[in-house]
Image (cartoon, helix red, strand yellow):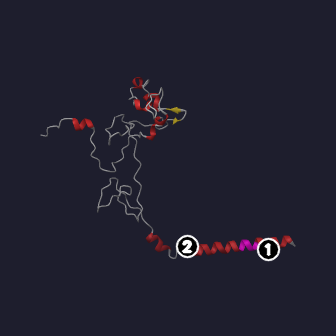
Amino acid sequence: MQNKQLWIAVALTGVLMALVFVAGWLVGRPKHVDAVADTAPVPVEARAVFIPGAGQIDALRRGVPVDQEGHPPPLAHVENADLKRARAYPMQPPTIPHTIDGYQVDRNSNRCMLCHARANASTFQAPPVSVTHYMDRDDQFLATISPRRYFCNQCHVVQTDAPVLVANQFRDIDSVLSPPTAKE
Protein backbone atom coordinates (compact mmCIF):
# COMPACT_ATOMS: atom_id res chain seq x y z
CA MET A 1 0.00 0.00 0.00
CA GLN A 2 2.81 2.45 0.87
CA ASN A 3 4.61 1.55 -2.35
CA LYS A 4 1.52 2.54 -4.39
CA GLN A 5 1.31 5.93 -2.64
CA LEU A 6 5.00 6.54 -3.33
CA TRP A 7 4.52 5.87 -7.05
CA ILE A 8 1.52 8.23 -7.16
CA ALA A 9 3.57 10.98 -5.44
CA VAL A 10 6.45 10.48 -7.89
CA ALA A 11 4.08 10.59 -10.87
CA LEU A 12 2.37 13.77 -9.63
CA THR A 13 5.75 15.42 -9.03
CA GLY A 14 6.83 14.54 -12.59
CA VAL A 15 3.61 15.95 -14.07
CA LEU A 16 3.95 19.12 -11.98
CA MET A 17 7.57 19.57 -13.12
CA ALA A 18 6.54 19.13 -16.75
CA LEU A 19 3.79 21.76 -16.35
CA VAL A 20 6.20 24.25 -14.76
CA PHE A 21 8.69 23.66 -17.60
CA VAL A 22 6.06 24.20 -20.31
CA ALA A 23 4.72 27.32 -18.57
CA GLY A 24 8.21 28.77 -18.27
CA TRP A 25 8.96 28.01 -21.89
CA LEU A 26 5.72 29.70 -23.06
CA VAL A 27 6.25 32.79 -20.92
CA GLY A 28 9.97 33.14 -21.62
CA ARG A 29 10.01 32.69 -25.39
CA PRO A 30 9.90 35.75 -27.67
CA LYS A 31 6.53 36.75 -29.12
CA HIS A 32 7.83 37.37 -32.65
CA VAL A 33 11.09 35.78 -33.73
CA ASP A 34 11.52 38.29 -36.60
CA ALA A 35 11.13 41.27 -34.25
CA VAL A 36 13.85 39.96 -31.93
CA ALA A 37 16.25 39.47 -34.83
CA ASP A 38 15.73 43.09 -35.92
CA THR A 39 16.29 44.55 -32.44
CA ALA A 40 19.31 42.42 -31.49
CA PRO A 41 22.33 44.69 -30.94
CA VAL A 42 24.85 44.51 -33.73
CA PRO A 43 28.43 45.07 -32.54
CA VAL A 44 29.82 48.43 -33.58
CA GLU A 45 33.31 48.63 -35.03
CA ALA A 46 35.37 50.24 -32.28
CA ARG A 47 38.00 52.81 -33.14
CA ALA A 48 41.54 51.88 -32.13
CA VAL A 49 42.50 55.44 -31.21
CA PHE A 50 40.35 57.39 -28.77
CA ILE A 51 39.23 60.75 -30.15
CA PRO A 52 37.14 62.70 -27.65
CA GLY A 53 33.99 64.21 -29.04
CA ALA A 54 31.07 66.19 -27.68
CA GLY A 55 32.87 66.76 -24.39
CA GLN A 56 32.69 63.08 -23.42
CA ILE A 57 35.68 61.18 -22.14
CA ASP A 58 35.17 57.55 -23.09
CA ALA A 59 38.56 55.91 -23.57
CA LEU A 60 37.41 52.55 -22.22
CA ARG A 61 34.54 52.12 -24.71
CA ARG A 62 36.58 53.57 -27.62
CA GLY A 63 33.70 55.72 -28.89
CA VAL A 64 31.05 52.98 -28.90
CA PRO A 65 27.71 54.20 -27.47
CA VAL A 66 26.77 52.74 -24.10
CA ASP A 67 23.66 51.03 -25.47
CA GLN A 68 25.63 49.17 -28.14
CA GLU A 69 28.24 46.45 -28.03
CA GLY A 70 31.62 47.05 -29.62
CA HIS A 71 34.03 44.62 -31.21
CA PRO A 72 37.15 44.05 -29.14
CA PRO A 73 40.30 45.37 -30.78
CA PRO A 74 42.46 42.73 -32.44
CA LEU A 75 45.23 41.20 -30.36
CA ALA A 76 48.52 42.95 -30.88
CA HIS A 77 51.53 41.05 -32.19
CA VAL A 78 54.62 40.85 -30.00
CA GLU A 79 57.61 42.58 -31.54
CA ASN A 80 60.92 40.80 -31.32
CA ALA A 81 63.24 43.53 -32.60
CA ASP A 82 65.47 43.77 -29.49
CA LEU A 83 65.30 47.58 -29.70
CA LYS A 84 65.02 49.74 -26.60
CA ARG A 85 61.91 51.93 -26.77
CA ALA A 86 61.50 55.43 -25.41
CA ARG A 87 59.38 55.69 -22.29
CA ALA A 88 55.80 56.93 -22.56
CA TYR A 89 55.64 58.59 -19.12
CA PRO A 90 57.99 59.41 -16.23
CA MET A 91 59.17 56.43 -14.17
CA GLN A 92 57.70 53.94 -16.66
CA PRO A 93 59.27 50.50 -16.29
CA PRO A 94 61.14 49.58 -19.47
CA THR A 95 59.23 47.42 -21.92
CA ILE A 96 60.56 43.99 -22.86
CA PRO A 97 61.98 44.09 -26.42
CA HIS A 98 61.79 40.34 -27.05
CA THR A 99 59.28 37.51 -26.75
CA ILE A 100 58.93 35.85 -23.38
CA ASP A 101 56.74 32.92 -24.41
CA GLY A 102 57.57 29.93 -22.27
CA TYR A 103 59.54 31.92 -19.69
CA GLN A 104 59.07 30.45 -16.24
CA VAL A 105 58.64 33.07 -13.54
CA ASP A 106 57.31 31.56 -10.35
CA ARG A 107 58.45 31.30 -6.75
CA ASN A 108 61.01 28.61 -7.63
CA SER A 109 62.51 30.06 -10.80
CA ASN A 110 62.85 33.36 -12.64
CA ARG A 111 63.96 32.92 -16.27
CA CYS A 112 64.50 36.67 -16.69
CA MET A 113 67.33 36.63 -14.16
CA LEU A 114 69.35 34.20 -16.29
CA CYS A 115 70.31 37.13 -18.53
CA HIS A 116 69.40 40.25 -16.54
CA ALA A 117 70.98 39.45 -13.16
CA ARG A 118 73.82 41.85 -12.51
CA ALA A 119 76.32 38.96 -12.50
CA ASN A 120 75.22 37.66 -15.93
CA ALA A 121 74.25 40.83 -17.79
CA SER A 122 77.62 41.43 -19.45
CA THR A 123 77.85 37.79 -20.58
CA PHE A 124 74.47 37.92 -22.31
CA GLN A 125 74.77 41.60 -23.37
CA ALA A 126 71.50 42.35 -21.59
CA PRO A 127 70.75 45.40 -19.48
CA PRO A 128 71.10 44.51 -15.80
CA VAL A 129 68.15 45.08 -13.50
CA SER A 130 68.29 48.28 -11.52
CA VAL A 131 69.84 48.28 -8.07
CA THR A 132 66.41 49.20 -6.75
CA HIS A 133 65.35 45.62 -7.51
CA TYR A 134 67.83 44.46 -4.85
CA MET A 135 66.38 46.73 -2.13
CA ASP A 136 63.77 45.75 0.42
CA ARG A 137 61.01 48.07 1.57
CA ASP A 138 63.32 49.54 4.23
CA ASP A 139 65.86 50.50 1.54
CA GLN A 140 68.31 47.86 2.73
CA PHE A 141 70.31 46.14 -0.03
CA LEU A 142 69.88 42.39 -0.43
CA ALA A 143 72.15 39.79 -2.02
CA THR A 144 69.37 38.62 -4.35
CA ILE A 145 66.36 40.17 -6.04
CA SER A 146 63.84 41.56 -3.57
CA PRO A 147 60.68 39.45 -3.26
CA ARG A 148 58.59 42.49 -4.10
CA ARG A 149 60.48 42.91 -7.39
CA TYR A 150 60.78 39.21 -8.25
CA PHE A 151 57.78 38.84 -10.60
CA CYS A 152 58.90 40.88 -13.60
CA ASN A 153 55.55 40.93 -15.44
CA GLN A 154 53.95 42.91 -12.64
CA CYS A 155 55.59 46.00 -14.13
CA HIS A 156 57.29 45.07 -17.40
CA VAL A 157 55.32 44.18 -20.55
CA VAL A 158 56.43 42.97 -23.96
CA GLN A 159 56.54 45.43 -26.84
CA THR A 160 53.69 45.03 -29.30
CA ASP A 161 52.45 46.69 -32.45
CA ALA A 162 49.29 47.87 -30.66
CA PRO A 163 48.09 51.33 -31.65
CA VAL A 164 48.28 54.17 -29.15
CA LEU A 165 44.93 54.43 -27.35
CA VAL A 166 45.33 57.92 -25.89
CA ALA A 167 47.43 60.76 -27.31
CA ASN A 168 50.55 61.53 -25.28
CA GLN A 169 53.05 64.39 -25.55
CA PHE A 170 55.49 63.13 -22.91
CA ARG A 171 59.14 63.99 -23.62
CA ASP A 172 61.96 62.39 -21.69
CA ILE A 173 64.55 64.55 -19.96
CA ASP A 174 67.16 64.03 -22.71
CA SER A 175 64.89 65.50 -25.37
CA VAL A 176 63.86 68.39 -23.11
CA LEU A 177 67.46 69.36 -22.36
CA SER A 178 68.81 68.88 -25.88
CA PRO A 179 69.18 72.03 -27.98
CA PRO A 180 66.44 72.55 -30.56
CA THR A 181 67.29 71.39 -34.05
CA ALA A 182 67.47 73.99 -36.80
CA LYS A 183 64.59 73.70 -39.21
CA GLU A 184 65.41 74.44 -42.81
Is residue 13 within the magenta segment? yes
Tell me the residue that label 1 is attached to: 8
Asked if the stretch drawn in magenta spans residue 69, the answer is no
Q: Is residue 129 visible?
A: no
The reply to whether residue 107 is in sight is yes
Frontmost residue, 50 versus 30: 50
| In the image, farthest residue toward the front | 138
Q: Quadrant of residue 90?
A: top left
Q: Residue furthest right?
A: 1
User: Which stretch did the figure color magenta?
Assistant: 11-15
Residue 179 occupies quadrant: top left
SS under mark 2: loop
Amino acid carrying mark 1 in the image: Ile
Residue holding disc 2: 29
Q: Earlier in the sequence, mark 1 or mark 2?
A: 1
1 vs 2, front mark: 1
* Residue drawn 37% across the image and 61% down it: 64
Q: Residues within 10 Å of mark 1 (few under 14, many from 20)?
A: few
Residues under numbered marks 1 and 2 in contact, where contact means CB atoms less than 8 Å apart: no
Q: Name the dominant secondary structure of the magenta segment.
A: helix
Residue 32 percent coordinates (x, y): 50, 76
Q: Amino acid at mark 2?
A: Arg
Q: Where is residue 81 shown, x and y percent of the image?
A: 36, 36
